[in-house]
Amino acid sequence: EKGGYEHFMLKEIYEQPRSIYDCFRGRLNVEEGWVGLGGIKDYERKLVNANRIIMVACGTSWHAAQVGEYLIEDLARIPVEVEYASEFRYRNPIINENDVVIAISQSGETADTLAAIGLAKSKGATILGICNVVGSSISRVTDAGSYTHAGPEIGVASTKAFTAQVTVLTLMALSIARKKGTLGESRLRALLGDLEAIPAKVEKVLEKSNIVEEVAAVYKNAANALYLGRGNCFPVALEGALKLKEISYIHAEGYPAAEMKHGPIALIDEEMPVIVLATKGTSYEKVVSNIQEVKARKGKIIAIITEGDVQVKELADHYIEIPDTDENLVPLLATIPLQLFSYYVAVMRGCNVDQPRNLAKSVTVE
Ligand code: M6R
């Protein structure tokens, strides 16, 4: 059942070229510049005209929502708010019929997310779902939705469900953008082509697993770890930190790289591994300065870089290269080495990777 892998988590990490492909299959056509999500077809107008989109989720699904915020705001130009379902449900939120609420959940059973949907419904908002488990409670109580089609996820630490959620959010952003005309025809086609190329690029990242394993061996006894990213790689940093915490029990924090000097920089010494998302893009130079700040305090840099990079390669103690892609799609690739890193560290520490202590696959109590 583990298909020859030692753990479900590793199997699920390796399934991602396929699960991402399954997620966009039939939902885009590069030649025609077409993209659409059948499940929410009847709500396309509503989305295009929405004043605001509110996303509610928990845990890793909340991180996917954070990536979705960058995608929808940048590509489709609709304001997006991302909320922890548990906070949203208890804070008397301002919400009305012109808002579209998107609930994101792998299991479709998360108690807080279900309650947040109930509240938004009572205020008259349109509710869409992004779920992995077909026929789950959330998929039944939403007005419409899109499945992620990632297949069953058994490992408690979410991996392939996250990249599938980000893929659906990319498709959603692109289909709204297409209808709204916020992207030129050629930019849309280019993005669709880049999305179609992602599974093969994920495959290339997975080929680097031995390098990730070597780095994991160096830091397996760390007491803490810091993850830094900017823009759409900030939620990737949060997700990387969550993965490490969950399965290896190492204290880890994700931060927007620029926030470091407002506090966390005090933690940095020669014992501290700092995982930096430093791929090519609009904030590249800024991230380079952040790396220099960490180096000046003797922190150890593990950088995720774009293939062919030279500057960060020289500064970093360790680097893992990922293929180049459109900046909007980088989270789909940059997440993979972080999943592998947490996996190898946890295995080396003798942890129960698939069923970490104190955690359940679906959190059906608040
Ligand atoms: O099934 P859901 O996506 O609603 O679950 C939300 C969180 O409980 C879940 O993502 C959790 O944080 C995972 N253990 C993360 O790996």
Image (cartoon, rainbow, N blue to C red):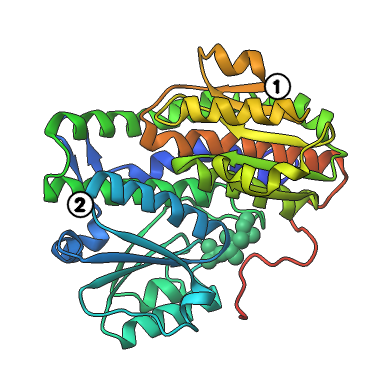
Relative to 128, does residue 256 appear above or below in the rendering?
above
- Secondary element under disc 1, as helix, strand or loop, is strand
Q: Give percent across and percent down for residue 301.
A: 70, 28
Q: Is mark 2 within 8 Å of ligand 1?
A: no
Q: Give percent across and percent down for residue 248.
A: 79, 49
Quarter of the image for residue 348 reads top right
- Residue 41 got which mark? none
Q: What residue is shown at x 38% (from left), y 76% (from top)?
A: 140
Label whose residue precedes the other's in the sequence (1 or 2)? 2
Q: In the rendered structure, which amino acid carries the disc numbered 1?
A: His
Relative to 187, does residue 114 appear above or below in the rendering?
below
- Which residue is the site of mark 2? 176
As drawn, the residue found furthest toward the bottom would be 122
Quarter of the image for residue 246 reads bottom right
Relative to 32, does residue 38 appear above or below in the rendering?
below
- Which is in the foreground here, disc 1 or disc 2? 1
Q: In the rendered structure, which amino acid carries the disc numbered 2?
A: Ile
Report whether 199 appears left or right of 96.
Answer: right
Q: What residue is shown at x 16% (from left), y 59% (from top)?
A: 48
Q: Give percent across and percent down for residue 26.
A: 27, 44
Q: Quadrant of the C terminus?
A: bottom right
Q: Give percent across and percent down for residue 219.
A: 82, 33
Report whether 221 appears left or right of 298.
Answer: right
Q: For this rendering, which residue is in front, 278 or 262?
A: 262
In terms of image quarters, where does ligand 1 lie?
bottom right
- Residue 318 got which mark? 1
Relative to 357, does residue 219 appear above or below in the rendering?
above
Look at the image and tell me whether residue 121 can be seen: yes
Pointer 2: residues within 10 angstroms few (<14), some, or many (20+)? many
